[in-house]
Amino acid sequence: MSARELARQIGINQSYLSLVTSGRRAPSRKMLTAASKALGLPADYFREAREAIVLEKIKGDPRLLDRVYDLVRGKGR
């Protein structure tokens, strides 16, 4: 599928898609979901989608935030 066709299917401008794919703009979660669907991929295929899910869970659970923080700081081993 061409970039032009993908942009059309997910309802965005091709130049915006180019900015996202080149790393100059961050994709929205809505855009990631639409792109995954258009490409026949799982909704959590893109790293940014998985990151958004993790951040949402962490923000909603202070204990999880502390556990992840300890893990990142090397205290959770």
Image: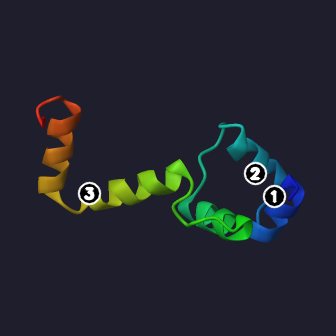
Q: What's the amino acid at mark 2?
A: Leu
Q: Nearer the viewer, residue 55 or 45?
A: 45
Tell me what residue is drawn at x 34 percent, y 60 percent: 56
Query: How many C-alpha atoms fall within 10 Å of the one at disc 1: few (<14), some, or many (≥20)?
Result: few
Tell me what residue is drawn at x 80 percent, y 70 percent: 9
Q: Quickly name the residue at label 1.
A: 13
Q: Quickly name the residue at label 2.
A: 17
User: Mark 2–mark 3 contact, CB under 8 Å?
Assistant: no
In the image, is 35 to the left or to the right of 13? Answer: left
Query: How many C-alpha atoms fall within 10 Å of the one at disc 2: few (<14), some, or many (≥20)?
Result: some
Q: Quickly name the residue at label 3.
A: 59
Q: How is the image coloured?
A: rainbow
Q: Nearer the viewer, residue 74 or 6?
A: 74
The x, y position of residue 1, in whole percent, is 86, 59
Q: Dot 3: what SS?
A: helix
Tell me what residue is drawn at x 75 percent, y 51 percent: 17
User: Mark 1–mark 2 contact, CB under 8 Å?
Assistant: yes
